[in-house]
Image: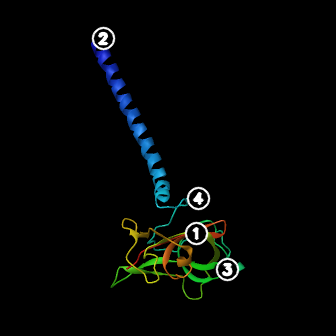
Amino acid sequence: MRGLLAAGAAVVVVLSSGVAAQAAHAAHAAHTAHAAPAAARASSGYVAAFPKYKAPKPFGTTFQSDPKHDFTKGIHSRHDGVLRGRITEIRGDVAEYEPIKWKKGTETEGYFVGPPQGDVMAYASPVAKDVVYLSAFGCSKSEGAMTVNRDTGLGNKRCARSVLMKREGKPALITVYKGKIVQVQEIWTP
């Protein structure tokens, strides 16, 4: 009987240490997963000075709603967060932009579309002086080779603000913080 109790106690110790090890591993994995994006941003030469917002699916098939926005009060900045959209016009330091959605094609994979003609779903925000612009097509005037994360299809080449200010109409994830555009990450499309 003592032998069985001793063996049972040993099993409990082994099992509890295994559970503790799994818990420690899970905690480390969660910390690593949270730290990885920050480490990736730091290793690529920039550190974001804005919160990390949940990004929409790059190829989402519906327009993102913005219940906090009153489109009857003229064109103005979207609330803080990430919009799947495209910059339609740049005047001075202010960019006008609109939401976009992916429309599956019949002869091709598909393409992005904006709101229907006459729809007032548009925004305007100043572009931050230190905006993070991650291009999917390189930084030269004539778009070069693909510069994307092959897993996500999102641009990963950091380019100067001046390059962004000359590019309109590219699908992107547009991050707004405190009324300014602080990051534009292009979505690669063929």
| Horizontal side of residue 189 vs 98, given as left or right | left
Dot label at residue 46: none
Image coordinates for residue 19, horizontal then vertical, percent: 38, 33
Q: Which residue is mark 2?
A: 2
Q: Quick one: 94 or 68, which is closer to the camera?
A: 94
Q: Quadrant of the C terminus?
A: bottom left
Q: Quick one: 42 or 171, which is closer to the camera?
A: 42
State the SS at label 4: loop
- Amino acid type, residue under disc 3 in the picture: Ile
Q: Tag 2 or tag 4, which sits nearer the N-term?
A: 2
* Residue occupying the point 70% across, 81% down: 74
Q: Which residue is mark 4?
A: 51
Image coordinates for residue 111, horizontal then vertical, percent: 42, 81
Image coordinates for residue 137, horizontal then vertical, percent: 42, 76
Q: Which-is-in-front pick, marks 2 and 3?
A: 3
Specify few, some or many for label 3: CA neighbours under 10 Å numbering under 14, 14-19, or 20 or more: some
Q: Tag 1 or tag 4, which sits nearer the N-term?
A: 4
Marks 2 and 3 close (CB-CB < 8 Å): no
Q: Which residue is mark 1?
A: 131
The residues tagged by marks 4 and 2 sit, at their Cα atoms, a distance apart of 59 Å
Q: Please tell me in which quadrant of the rendered image residue 16 appears.
A: top left
Q: Quick one: 157 or 33, which is closer to the camera?
A: 157
Q: Which-is-in-front pick, marks 3 and 4?
A: 4
The residues tagged by marks 1 and 3 sit, at their Cα atoms, a distance apart of 21 Å
Marks 2 and 1 close (CB-CB < 8 Å): no
Specify few, some or many for label 1: CA neighbours under 10 Å numbering under 14, 14-19, or 20 or more: some
Q: Which residue is mark 3?
A: 75
The residues tagged by marks 4 and 1 sit, at their Cα atoms, a distance apart of 14 Å
Marks 4 and 1 close (CB-CB < 8 Å): no
- Can you see residue 145? yes
- Amino acid type, residue under disc 2 in the picture: Arg
Q: Please tell me in which quadrant of the rendered image residue 69 appears.
A: bottom right
